[in-house]
Image: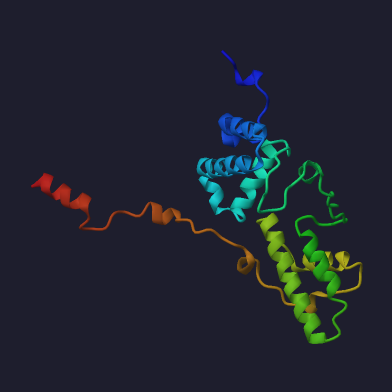
Amino acid sequence: MEYNTARPDLQLPEYGRNVKKMVNFALTVEDKEERQKVVAAIIQVMGQLNPHLRDVDDYNHKLWDHIFIMSDFKLDVESPYPIPTKETFETKPNSISYPKGNIRYGHYGESIQDLIDAIPAKTDPEERKALTQCVANLMKRFYLTWNRDSVEDQTILNQMNEISGGKLELKLEDLALKNSSELQVKGVRPTEAQSNRPAKKGGRFQKNHRKKRN
């Protein structure tokens, strides 16, 4: 008996070993026209074995790429799509640099830092005040999400001044922040009174109880 562990690895296991044997057979067909017909038949079988691929964009293009991969890019046939090479799939993409920044308060995130940096650039006093008010309330909401108790408005203003590097110099009388109860997101939970509420008169239990007594 031959075990799969002793067989060569499959490039695309989802198609199975039989499809791999078909591709290997196509490589042995010397007549190019006949080889083209064999590959077209294999493409149809591959599509039937993986019908979920039909929901993928460029469905046929993906099947043709897969058959070239299974042939180790040695298949010499005409393709309706650009024929891929081994380098196409082996070349690693360029690494994306991770944004680095020193965030003093992690629960606010970098977006708050960007918003606070944009405030001093506002020349219109009303626009500047509106943006400051919005950012302060947003910071208070984030703070309450991180710490469910409460937070003093002065704490939020102090942190805004610190994040801005002293460019804002906000005072408590400059802004009127929303109450913590308005900013907290609360779930709907039944109260203890609701859970212990007695059954209404005339309910099913009392009707059945009357029948037993009678």
Residue at image point 81% right, 44% down: 92
Residue 14 at x, y percent in the picture: 59, 36
Residue 135 image position (x, y, % from top left): 75, 71
In front of the other: 92 or 111: 92
The answer, for residue 16, to whether it is visible in the render is yes
Q: Nearer the viewer, residue 134 or 14?
A: 14
Query: Quadrant location of residue 173?
Result: bottom right
Quarter of the image where the N terminus is located:
top right
Residue appearing at x 20%, y 58% in the figure: 202
Residue 1's place in the image compared with 75, above or below, is above
Q: Residue at x 53, y 58 (%)?
A: 187
Give the side of residue 173 with respect to residue 75, left or right.
right
Quadrant in which residue 201 is drawn: bottom left
**Residue 150 appears in the rendering:** no
Observer-nearest of 100 and 197: 100
For residue 189, side relative to residue 148 (left or right):
left
Q: In the figure, 37 relative to 100: above or below? A: above
The residue that appears at 65% across and 18% down in the rendered structure is: 6
Task: Name, please, the residue furthest toward the right.
Answer: 166
In the orientation shown, which residue stands out farthest toward the top? Answer: 1
**138 sits left or right of 93 in the view:** left
Q: Where does residue 203 sit, x and y in percent of width and height?
A: 22, 55
